[in-house]
Image (cartoon, helix red, strand yellow):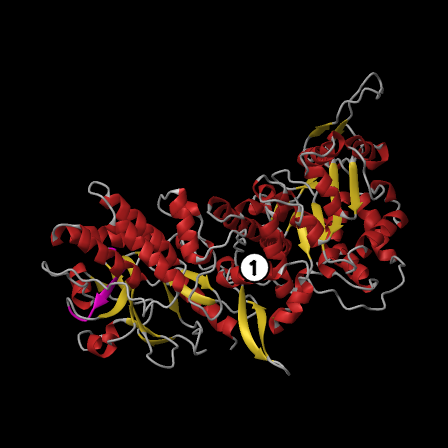
Amino acid sequence: MTYKGERDEYIRHYFNCGLHPIPLWPRSKRPKGPQWQKQDLADSSDWQVAKFGDADNVGLLCGTPVDDGFIVCADLDSGRDDFEKRVQVEDFCVVKSGRESAEGRHYWFVAENLPKSRAFHLNHGGPRVGELQSTGRQCVAPPSIHEKSGKQYELIHGDFDDLPILSDEEIERLFPSKAVEQNEVTYKPLDEGEIKDRAVRNIIAFARERVSSAIPGERHNLINRVAYWLGGFVGSGDLEEEVARSNLRDCTGLIFDNQEEARAEFKTIDDGIRSGIKRPLHLSRIERADLPEMSDEEWFKFKKRLGLTSKPEPQVVEKVDTIPPIPNHILYPPGPIGDLCKFINETSIRPQPYLSLGASLAFFGMLLGKRVRSPQDTRTNVYCVGVAGTASGKEHARKVLRLLAEEAEVGHHIPGEDFTSASAIERVVGKPENESNAMFLLDEWGDIMSGLINSNAPTFKQGIQRTLMKLYSAADGVYAGQEYAEQRVNDQRQQTFKQPCVTIYATTTPESYFGVMKSMHVVNGFLNRYLHFIADPQRPEELEGGILKIPRSLKDEVRRIKALPINQIAGTGSHNPDLIEPQILKYSDKASLIRQEFRDLCDQKIDGDDQFKDLWGRSSQFVVQVALILSATQNKSEIEYEDMLLAVEIVELCIKRTIHSVKLQLADNEQEHITKKVYRTIEDAGRKGMLKSTLCKKTYYLKAYERKDIIQTLEDSGQILIEEVKTSKKISLRYVASAHA
C-alpha cells in the first residue's frame, strides 16, 4: 500500500473518532499554513482528506472538545521507564516515534477539564521528562514519517476510538508539574560558552540590560514586553525557550527586594514568552518596531551590536506546496466539450489539454446563452483565462475555436482579438444576429489587464473593465449601455441588452499576468471573477500536430446547440426577442447534495482567516455554471450527479492552482518580487535542485550580497533546503525547493 493510501485511511479514521487531523510538511513536524490552530472540526469527507498533499505528514490538533472532555497528548522524550512503572500503559493510546535512538512516546487521553500546555516531571520537583500538549498544540500521528530516521510513527497500544478519561487529580499524579519551593529561585545565567551564536548572546545581553535597569512602578510592564519579545525569537527557532526563561528569571531575582515578589513575576515571564512564540521574529530581520521602546542612539548601538546592515531586508516568502496535479479524467468531459478538447489537442504542436478545457467551456457557454439556466437563474457566461509559458502552445485553442465558429456559421459571435473601448464591446454584443451573445478570444491578456487595472490608465481603458464586469453581472437581467453623444438611434443615446451572455477565453504568461497584480486584487474581487486554467511550468513536448480540418460531427453539434430556442414557455419555441425564458435545468438529488457540500466548503474558506479566502468567493457559482454547460451540451433535461461532481473537480483545481500561482508570483514591492523570482528559478529545477553556480548564472541581475540575503531568507522561511554536494572539482552548494524535497 502506498503511503498516501495508508495515510488517507488513517485520516478518515481520525475524523470518525472525533479528532482533528491537520496537514504537516512531508517528513516534518511543522504544520502547513499560518492558521492551523484555528481550523474547525469537520466531517470525514473527501473534501477534508483532499487538503493533504500526497507526501504530507499528519498531526492531531490537541485541546479539541469531544463528548467526554478534551483531547490531550503527553509527549515523553525521556524517563519513559520510570513513568511506565506508575501507569497502566495498556490503558492509553500510545504512539511510538520513528526515531532510531531515544524513541519517544505519545500518550493520548481525554481530560475531563482542559489543562494548560506545560512541561511535566517524574516527581514534583524532579527532572523534566515531557510535555502536556493541549490547546494551540499538535502532535505527530501515525503513519507520519520521522524527519530524520525515515521511519513511520507507530501505534503500539490502544486506539483513538477508545481513549481513557482522566480527572484533574489523575493528570497531576501521572504528569506532575514542577513545584517551586518557597525559599528557592532557580535560574540559568547567561553563559557565553554555551551560547555560541553572537546574535543570540547579544539579544540575551540586551534583554538582561533592559530588565536590570527597570525602575519601580514600571518593572512589571517592562518584564512582560521583554518576555514577549524574546518569545518571538523562540517561536522562530532562533532562541531556546529555556535560555530565554532562565535569563529573565535571573534578572528578576536581582531587581526585586524579596524572593516572593520575584516568584510572582515568573508567571509574567512565562505568559509573555508563550504569547510571543505565536508571533515569530527572526534575528536576521529585526526591525525597530519589533523591539521594546528605545531611543535613536540605542537603536544605532543595537544594530551595530548585532551586525545589522542598512541594506533593505529581503521579504519573507510564504512556504508554497508543489502545484496541484491535473487529473487526466477531467480533461475530456463527455459530450461535445470532450470531443472539442480532443480535436484541439490532437492538432496542436504543443498540446495544452488543461487550457483546451477552459477554451471549450467558454465557447459552448457562449452558445448556450439565453437557452438554459439553473434553478437560481445562474447562466453560462464564464470568463476563462489560460495561463502558460512563452511558446508553450497556448494560442492553438483560440485558432481552432475561430475556425470552428466560421465553419459552423456562428463566426459573427466572435469579433477580432482586440477591443479598444467599452463602446467597441457594446457594438459587438449589440449586433442583432448575436442575440446579445459574444465570445472574446484575447491574447496577451496580462498586457491588456495591466492597462485596465492601472489607476493611471486612460478613462476609456478603465471603462473596458467596468463594462466587462457589468455584462457579466447582467446575464440574468438587463444591461444598460453607456451613453455617447454621437449616438443617435431613434433619439436614443443608450443601448440596452436583455440577458447578455458574454464569455472570454484569454491567454497570457504567468509573469505578465500575475506580475501586474498586487494583493489588493486578491481582496477586491478582481481575480475571483475569472476561472484560471494554469498549465504546468514545463513546456509540453513538441509533436507533429495535425491538419486543421474541423470534423463534421463538431460542426453539427455547434449548429444543434445554436438552434435551441431561447423561449421555452409552453414549448412554443418562439424566438420573440421580447420574451426570453431559458429552459431551467434542475439538479438531480445527488447533484444537489454535491453542490451543497461544495458550498459548505467554500463558506468555510470564506469565513476563515486564510489570506486567500477571497479567491473562493465565486467558486460555488462557477461550479453551477460549469455543470450547466456540461449537462446542456449533452442534451440533458437536468444537471446530473456526474456533471456536478466533474464541475466541482474542475473549479476546485482552478482555485487551488490560482492560489499556488498567487503565492509564487504576486508581490507588492520590488524586493518581494525579486525574492519570489529567485524561488521560482530554484523551484523550476525540480527534485534535482540547482547548483550555486547555476543559480548565479540565472540570477546575473543580482549583486552577490543581494543573492546571499535572498537565499538566506528562503532558507529561514523554509522555502528551500541547502545541501553540500561533491562535484568533480570541489564541494559545492545545491539549492532544492522544499516542496520537492
336 vs 516: above or below: below
329 left or right, relative to 348:
left
Residue at the spot 77% in from the left edge and 55% down from the top edge = 336
From the top left corner, tell me how far across and down residue 620 is, in percent: 58, 46
609 vs 458: above or below: below
Residue 637 in view in this figure? no
Residue at the spot 28% in from the left edge and 46% down from the top edge = 222
- Kindly identify which residue carries mark 1: 710
Kind of residue at disc 1: Ile
Label 1 element class: helix
Number of on-image labels: 1
Depth order, front residue of 442/563: 442
Depth order, front residue of 364/718: 718
Using the rendered view, name the quadrant where residue 244 is placed. Answer: bottom left
From the top left corner, tell me how far across and down residue 735 is, in percent: 58, 69
Residue furthest to the left: 183
Depth order, front residue of 550/539: 539
Residue at the spot 18% in from the left edge and 54% down from the top edge = 254
Query: What secondary structure prevails in the magenta region?
Result: loop
From the top left corner, tell me how far across and down residue 228 is, in percent: 32, 51
419 vs 27: above or below: above
On whether residue 118 falls in the magenta region, the answer is: yes
Depth order, front residue of 282/181: 282
Residue 302 in view in this figure? yes
426 left or right, relative to 215:
right
258 left or right, relative to 551:
left
From the top left corner, tell me how far across and down residue 310 is, in percent: 51, 51
531 left or right, relative to 10:
right
470 vs 161: above or below: above
Quarter of the figure that contains the C terminus: bottom right
Using the rendered view, name the quadrant where residue 517 is placed. Answer: top right
Residue range highlighted in magenta: 114-123
